[in-house]
Image (spheres, grey):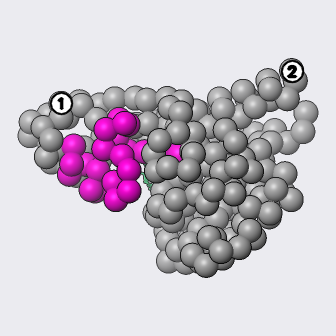
Amino acid sequence: MRKRSIVIFASGSGSNVEKIAEYFADRSDVEISLILSNNPKAGVIERARRYHIPVLLFDRTGFYQTDQVTSLLQKQGVDLIVLAGFMWLMPVPLVQAFPNRIVNIHPALLPKFGGKGMYGHFVHEAVVGAGETESGITIHFVNEQYDEGQVIFQATCPVEPTDDAEAVARKVQVLEHRHYPRVVDEVLQRLDLQYEL
Ligand code: GRF
């Protein structure tokens, strides 16, 4: 079987990248071939180095005004693009080049608390502010709109009346780390089934 290639877009601390790298570390059939980031200061860069995963940095102009990233990923024969803490909207040509092959994780139960500006602590503050009794994670395919692609998986956690945004963030992060690597793996296996049809 051909080795499957994952690339990950990440611009934050990279804790999800690390969990995904750990999960696939012993797998000879799957390779995390590249981390792409717009943030040279992101914690994910150091984590990538520890796992010997190459990093490609790009800026806004390169990402939106050229097809460099899309054509590189096409040339590399990438099977799945994983977003893990990447804040920018995917350019339309990139989405169109990889239909149902880009997945994102959002730290809330979409369709609630999604869309532009809903990231990081803003999400958890909104959840607490709205008096929600539960939050969670949504793993979904990426389309041309923020947080609107088809949902693949959700998991929930309770929000207690005494929880502040930080408390909710901690619970949500536990869910992310527990589920994202496994769901990425499942999406990859489904791609394999499609290949065999
Ligand atoms: C996660 O909360 C994820 O849901 C969101 O960005 C955050 C990334 O965290 N899309 P990390 O960089 O993986 O620690």
| Residue range of the region highlighted in magenta in the rendering | 104-127
Return the residue nearer the eye: 40 or 81.
Answer: 81
Residue in view at x 74 percent, y 68 percent = 67
Residue in view at x 28 percent, y 56 percent = 121
Mark 1 residue type:
Thr
Q: Is residue 161 left or right of residue 30?
A: left
Residue under label 1, please give it: 133
Is residue 106 found inside the magenta-colored segment of the image? yes
Instruction: Please tell me how many numbered marks the rendered image carries.
Output: 2
Could one spot residue 139 in this view of the protein?
A: yes
Report x, y in % for residue 78: 78, 50
- Decide which of tag 1 and tag 2 comes sooner along the chain: 1
Instruction: Please tell me whether mark 2 sits on a helix, a strand or a loop.
Output: loop
The N terminus, quarter of image: top right
Within the image, what quadrant is residue 142 found in?
top right
Could one spot residue 28 in this view of the protein?
A: no
Against 182, residue 55 (above or below) is below
Residue under label 2, please give it: 197
Within the image, what quadrant is residue 99 found in?
top right
Return the residue nearer the eye: 133 or 100.
Answer: 100
Q: Crowdedness of circle 2 by 10 Å Cα count: few (<14), some, many (20+)?
A: few
Residue in view at x 40 percent, y 29 percent = 155
Report x, y in % for residue 63: 63, 71
Report x, y in % for residue 71: 80, 63
Residue in view at x 38 percent, y 37 percent = 110
Mark 2 residue type:
Leu
Q: Between tags 1 and 2, which lies in front? A: 2
Within the image, what quadrant is residue 134 found in?
top left
